Amino acid sequence: MAVTIDIGEWNDILPIHKENVGKRLALTAQRRAYGDTNVVHSGPIYKSMEMNGNKMIISFTDVGSGLFVRGSGELNCYSIAGTDKEFIGVKAKIQGNMVVVWNDSIGQPVAVRYAWADNPDESNLYNSERLPASPF
């Protein structure tokens, strides 16, 4: 699998810049098929979450050399839900190799989403190798 949410087209499943898709798939082949463990082949993949008061702490695999925010410096495209299961936008920040999300109006969050949209063009969590995080 290669995540391409940052190089696709909003109105077409086929991205114009297919070379970038090929490069990401080649990284995956180099790692998976050829066993090159020195290659970072993927962006961050959701691993688990832990609740800490009104905050959710999200852990990832495939963080490479660390997490990175592309663009403005503020993480986008996260939402959480409380027991009512209504998702709302949140504040989010990188803390080490984890992301902490919260919204002061939700005292006990029970679920979290990232880039959960048909065209998450504002998603901006990457690893330092500039590979995008997978939506979850």
Image (cartoon, helix red, strand yellow):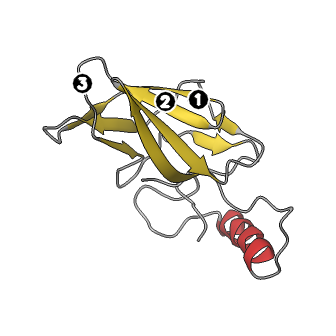
Q: Which residue is mark 2?
A: 100
Label 3 and label 1: CA atoms lie apart by 20 Å
Badge 1 local density, few (<14 within 10 Å), some, or many (20+)?
A: some
The answer to whether mark 2 and mark 1 are in CB contact below 8 A is yes
Q: Which residue is mark 1?
A: 94
**Amino acid under disc 2:** Val
- Circle nearer the N terminus (3, 2): 2
Label 3 and label 2: CA atoms lie apart by 14 Å
* Secondary element at tag 1: strand
Q: Position of residue 133 (x, y in %)?
A: 57, 50
Q: Position of residue 112 (x, y in %)?
A: 35, 42
Q: Position of residue 110 (x, y in %)?
A: 27, 40
- Examine the image and state in which quarter residue 31 appears: bottom right
Q: Which residue is mark 3?
A: 106
- In the image, is 94 to the left or to the right of 31? left
**Amino acid under disc 1:** Ile
The answer to whether mark 3 and mark 1 are in CB contact below 8 A is no
